[in-house]
Amino acid sequence: MTRRHATPRPSNAAEVEITDLSFLYPDGSIGLDGLTLRVPAGERLALLGPNGAGKTTLAQHLNGLKTAQRGSVRVDDMLIETATLPIIRQRVQLLFSSSDEQLFMPTVAEDVAFGPNNFDLDPELVDERVASALSAVGASDLAGRVPHRLSTGEKRRAALAGILAIQPDVLVLDEPVAGLDPAGKRQLAQYLGQLGQTQIVITHDLSFALELCPTAAIINNGRLQAIGPTVELLTDQELLRQNSLDLPFGFRLDRLDGTPSASAKRPGRRKS
Ligand SMILES: Nc1ncnc2c1ncn2[C@@H]1O[C@H](COP(=O)(O)OP(=O)(O)OP(=O)(O)O)[C@@H](O)[C@H]1O
Ligand SMILES: [Mg+2]
């Protein structure tokens, strides 16, 4: 995030369209390999896949931290490219997989206020946004604390409050529940579930994905493997096995109302 003043703009859900996106790291590691994926405006999509699948690499392309070597990313009708980055960084907010990279102000409240302050909002409105974002993630009591002295889960909450306070059109959350306790996880799922923005939620927590995201995509080796209703992907044992995914011990998908059996076909899947 840069210290730059810009006119605040109202937030709306936006469509995200990723087309044939490829990214090779300088050492030759494949980050993304021709990934194509469309996330309709307002959808909450869980992005699943094993370690090294390319999830974080993809997230970094969605707000321009990395630029496409081949292919493209569009947010509504706006192509992500150098000229559009100032607007894209208002419209798309990324929760980094490491909170230490995201928190840098002397107190949590100042950190959460940093984004809204960039948009020249009325100070009272900034205070309101800070209070409401901190409350949403159950972190009101952390407002006066020094970010780098917080626990892992507390840092996660503070970093998340910081991006929520900006009220972007698209939230890209890289492992938002890593380090959160079970109550914090549930509270977060309930809060995010009420927001109207497009959400791309990277997680290894399949029960959180199921609770929050009606749709899921599995990526592996930098490519899309499957996309469809989360419950259907998570009942496909073979698909899970092929992608090193596993439901938590004792987790019974067949106990959920309306859940198809493990052998169900996948009629609801869509091409991306
Ligand atoms: N800075 C880097 N330099 C070289 N290779 C990298 C770098 N960052 C990631 N990679 C490689 O790119 C591939 C995709 O990594 P990425 O971090 O996107 O995976 P991920 O799906 O987010 O994994 P995880 O679940 O472990 O967070 C992996 O093979 C990884 O080793
Ligand atoms: Mg990652």
Image (cartoon, rainbow, N blue to C red):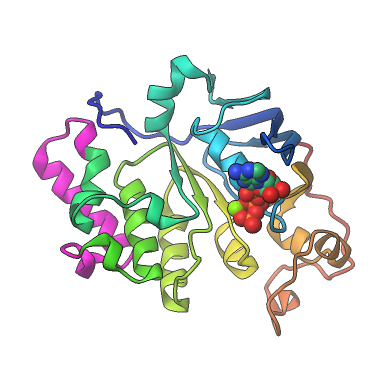
Residue in the foreground of this view, choosing between 116 and 104: 104
Residue in the foreground of this view, choosing between 99 and 215: 99
Q: Report the quarter where the C terminus lies.
A: top right
Q: Quadrant of residue 266?
A: bottom right
Q: Is residue 205 above or below residue 167?
A: below
Q: Which residue is at the far front?
A: 27
Q: Which residues are magenta?
A: 117-145
Residue drawn at x 72%, y 74% is 253
Q: Could you tell me residue 241's position as x and y percent?
A: 84, 65
Residue 131 visible to the viewer? no
Q: Would you say residue 133 sits in the magenta stretch? A: yes
Report the side of 98 relative to 53 (left or right): left
Specify the principal SS of the magenta part. helix
Q: Is residue 220 above or below residue 93?
A: below
Q: Could you tell me residue 248's position as x and y percent?
A: 68, 77
Q: Would you say residue 90 sits in the magenta stretch? A: no
Q: Report the quarter where the N terminus lies.
A: top left
Report the side of 40 relative to 252 (left or right): left
Q: Could you tell me residue 129's position as x and y percent?
A: 22, 48
Residue drawn at x 46%, y 36% is 13
Residue drawn at x 42%, y 55% is 194
Q: Which residue is at the far bottom?
A: 250
Q: Could you tell me residue 56's position as x and y percent?
A: 59, 47
Residue drawn at x 19%, y 37% is 117
Residue 38 visible to the viewer? yes
Q: Is residue 80 above or below residue 206?
A: above
